[in-house]
Image (cartoon, coloured by chain):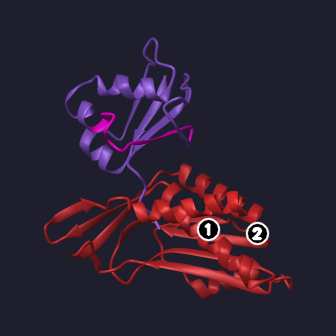
Chain colours: A purple, B red
Amino acid sequence: MVKLLYFARLRERLDCATESLELPAGVSTVGALRLWLAGRGGEWQAALAQDQSVRVAVNQDMASDATPVQDHDEVAFFPPVTGG
Amino acid sequence: MVAARVRVQEADFDASHEIARLRAGDPRVGAVASFIGVCRDLNEGDAVATMTLEHYPGMTERSIERIIDEAMGRWQVFDALVVHRVGQLEPLDQIVFVAVTSAHRGDAFAACEFIMDYLKTQAPFWKREQTATGPRWVAARSSDDAAAARWAEAAIKG
C-alpha cells in the first residue's frame, strides 16, 4: 500500500485529504501514479491533468515525474506553495 | 538541550525573545539579521479579513531544516531559527520569523534573505484568504520563483 496525501486547493477539489492505495500494476513512478489517478475521471481528471500546476513529494521530499514510487511510500500532491 | 531550529506553531512569537535566545552565550556573534513576515489587509486589490495557513506536517520542518543547512554551507553562519505560524491569522498578525547569527553582517543578511526566498518556494505551506467575495487560495507568485532562482544563478557565477 502507498499512502496518498492531498493538500490545500487540491484537497478541496478532490474532496480527499488522504487515502491508502494498492499500487496499481505497472505504476512505479510519480508520473505514472498521477496519470493513473487522473484516470479516475471527473474532478480527478481535471485537477491532475498535465496542464495543472501540481507539485508532488515522495516520503516528504520534492519529487519529479521520474521519481520512483514503491510500496509503503508516502506520496503527497499539492499546488505550488504560498507560505512565508 | 539544543533548541529546535525550526518551529511551526499556531501561537504568536516574540522576536526579541527569540533573538536573545539564539545568540545567548555566543561571543562569536557580531551580527544578527532577522526578518518578520506580517499579514496585510490587502492582497491583489481585495480586502483580506482573515487568512488561514495550512501545511504538510513533517515535510514542512524537514524542508526548512534543509534550507537552513544549505544557507549554513554557503555563508559563515553560527546559528539560525525559523518560526512559522499556521492556523487562522488576521491583518497585523505576524506570520513568519527568520533570524541568523554570524560574525559579520554580510553573511547574516545574505543567509537570512536566502532562507526566506527558499522558504517561499520550497516549504509546503498554503494560504487561504477570506475576502468580501468569499474564500480563495492564494496563488503562487512568479516573482517568488525568480527571487529564489537568483541564488542559484549567484552560485553558478560565484
Q: Is residue B118 visible?
A: no
What residue is shown with label 1? B114
The numbered mark at residue A84 is none
Which image quadrant is residue B1 in? bottom right
Q: Is residue B24 left or right of residue B85?
A: right
Q: Which residues are magenta?
A: A47-60
- Asked whether residue A28 appears in the rendered view, the answer is yes
- The residue tagged with tag 2: helix, strand or loop? loop
Identify the residue under disc 2: B75
Residue B32 point in image, percent of width and height: 70, 84
Q: Which callout, 1 or 2, points at the residue further toward the start of the chain?
A: 2
Where residue B125 sits in the image (x, y, percent)?
Answer: 44, 58
Residue A59 within the segment the image draws in magenta? yes
Do the residues bearing badges 1 and 2 touch, measured as CB atoms within 8 Å? yes
Disc 2 marks which amino acid? Trp
In this view, the residue farthest toward the top is: A25
Q: Position of residue B139 (x, y in %)?
A: 32, 59
Q: Nearer the viewer, residue B105 or B133?
A: B105
